[in-house]
Image (cartoon, helix red, strand yellow):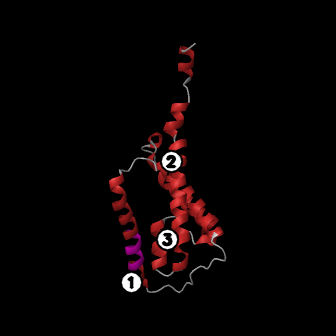
Amino acid sequence: MRGKLPLADVPGYIIGQVGGGLLAAYLVLYMKGNPTVTPMQFASPAVPFLAEFLGTFALAFVVLNVATAKANSNNSFYGLAIGFTVVAAAFAFGGYSGGAFNPAVALGITAMGLNAVANVWIHLLADFAGGAAAALAFRYLSPERLQQMVVAPQEVKENR
């Protein structure tokens, strides 16, 4: 969506993310055993979809702005910004959707039995849509793009 990842690299990236999420889930199951938590059940897919979409959008938008924008390169705050966004999203939306905010995490918690298999589509669709919306928003609202749109005061004087 941002145009920064070559299309040929996308499948490997997806396989790596999903594989890592599933490997982590199975490793936790091996080390800790089956969870005693009952998977969340949703009366309607609308509320968990919206919760996942908003949480994923917020997380992806913050990551794009603080960890990838040239204007913020070499900053020391990106970890805090991302971490606080995860915590805020978990508190705000976690009770409504389970708070995956990442397709790989959604598959991982489903593999662990913390999410019903019948509900995984909600997380996957919402997480991909939220991430795509964040990428598009960043693409059009990025600091670099906005800086190009703003005319420096000296340029205005020179053009008079």
Q: Is residue 25 magenta?
A: yes
Three-letter amino acid code at the position of disc 1:
Tyr
* Relative depth, front residue between 14 and 76: 14
Distance from disc 2 to disc 3, alpha carbons, whole Å, reads 24 Å
Q: Position of residue 25 (x, y in %)?
A: 42, 76
User: In terms of secondary structure, what is the magenta stretch mainly?
Assistant: helix
The residue where tag 1 is placed is: 30
Q: Is residue 72 above or below residue 160?
A: below
In the image, farthest residue toward the top = 160
Between disc 2 and disc 3, the foreground one is 3
| The C terminus lies in quadrant | top right
Circle 1 Cα neighbour tier, 10 Å, few/some/many (<14 / 14–19 / ≥20)? few
**The stretch drawn in magenta includes residue 145:** no
Question: In the displayed structure, would residue 118 be above or below residue 88?
Answer: below
Residue drawn at 63 percent across, 64 percent down: 50
When asked about the image quadrant of residue 150, the answer is: top right
Left or right? Give the position of 22 relative to 36: left
Q: Position of residue 32 (x, y in %)?
A: 43, 84
- Earlier-in-chain disc, 1 versus 2: 1
Q: Nearer the viewer, residue 130 or 24?
A: 130
- In this rendering, position of residue 149 left or right of residue 26: right
The residue where tag 3 is placed is: 106
Question: Is 32 in front, or is 131?
Answer: 131
Task: Give the class, few, some or many, for how many residues have Cα within 10 Å of label 3's Cα (few <14, many ≥20).
Answer: many
Quarter assignment of residue 40: bottom right
Asked if residue 121 shows in the view, the reply is: yes
Q: CA distance from mark 1 to mark 3?
A: 18 Å
Q: What range of the chain is rendered magenta?
A: 20-26
| Residue to which mark 2 is pinned | 65
> Mark 2: which amino acid?
Asn
Q: CA distance from mark 1 to mark 2?
A: 37 Å
